[in-house]
Image (tube, helix red, strand yellow):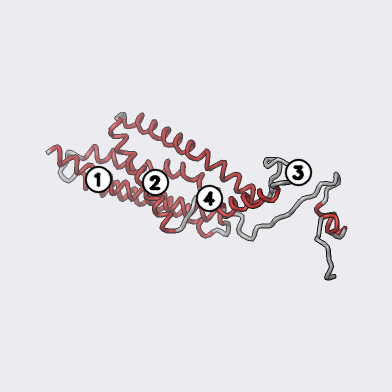
Amino acid sequence: MLKAEPVTVERLPPAIRDKVYSQDGRFAVYAYPNFDAADISMGLKFMEETAKYTEGVEGLQSDDALFVGETTVYALMYKLMQSEAPTVLAMALVLIAVIVVAQIRSLSRTLWTLAPLLLGMLWLVGLMAAAGVRFTLFNIPILPAILGIGVDNGVYLTDRIRHMRHEAGGIAHALGETGAAIGAATATTAMGFGAFCIADSGGLRGIGVLAVFGIGIAAVTAILVLPSVAAIAARRKR
């Protein structure tokens, strides 16, 4: 026993060897990660590490071998989504802007309407960093929905301010009426997505947290930014 030779696949007991050998004589290596497969950052590191296992194997190219499994699938899907997400989000934002322009029929008011939404997305990234929330394979698809829901706040509030800006206290009145409606609508929508936050699935929880953060911040930025900009513009005209 003290003179045991190195263990090779051929020297394994038949009961073990039969589990890794295929009928054509090839064999597989099973590597099980010791972390949650939903942790994409660890999944990417797992892919990098397992890719080194096949380096130097005669007759095997680096692209011919890939460790497959739940972890690898999630990581590959995340890499694919990471490369396509900017294009998808840009297309969603362009389509939203086109619809807003068609409704408002003014480029300047469209930019004014979209400004809080874009600012809210920046605040969302900062809040996620502060709260330790990450973009994952599951919650990234909710971003276009946040854009679509969040732009409503700017459309309603901009239109109300535009119709009441010439009245005494019109901006404050518009904020009081429309702002309250925006707050109520945001609360009900956030509660709907917030139900995901208590799910056992980490993916559903991630969707719920990101949706609540995004929808809430979109409402806050609209209520804070649009009346302030309108008030500053009104003072300059005087």
User: Whole-Å distance between the Cαs marked 1 and 2?
Assistant: 19 Å
Q: Mark 2 points at which residue?
A: 121
Of the residues tagged 1 and 4, which is closer to the observer? Answer: 4
Q: Earlier in the sequence, mark 3 or mark 4?
A: 3
Q: Which of marks 4 and 2 is nearer the N terminus?
A: 2
Residue type (three-letter) at the residue carrying disc 4: Thr
Please state the horizontal and vertical placement of residue 48, each as a whole percent of the image. Answer: 61, 50
User: Whole-Å distance between the Cαs marked 4 and 2?
Assistant: 16 Å
Q: Which of marks 3 and 1 is nearer the N terminus?
A: 3
Q: Circle 4 — which element?
A: loop
Q: Earlier in the sequence, mark 1 or mark 4?
A: 4
Q: Residue furthest bottom?
A: 2
Give the numbered dot on residue 58. Answer: 3
Q: Circle 2 — which element?
A: helix
Of the residues tagged 3 and 4, which is closer to the observer? Answer: 3
Q: Are there few (<14), some (14-19), or many (20+) residues within 10 Å of tag 4?
A: many
Residue type (three-letter) at the residue carrying disc 2: Met
Of the residues tagged 1 and 2, which is closer to the observer? Answer: 2
Q: Do the residues labelled 4 and 2 touch (CB within 8 Å)?
A: no
Q: Mark 1 points at which residue?
A: 227
Residue lying at 68% horizontally and 42% vertically, measured from the top left:
62
Of the residues tagged 3 and 2, which is closer to the observer? Answer: 3
Give the numbered dot on residue 136. Answer: 4
**121 with respect to 58 (left or right):** left
Residue type (three-letter) at the residue carrying disc 1: Pro
Image quadrant where one finds the C terminus: top left
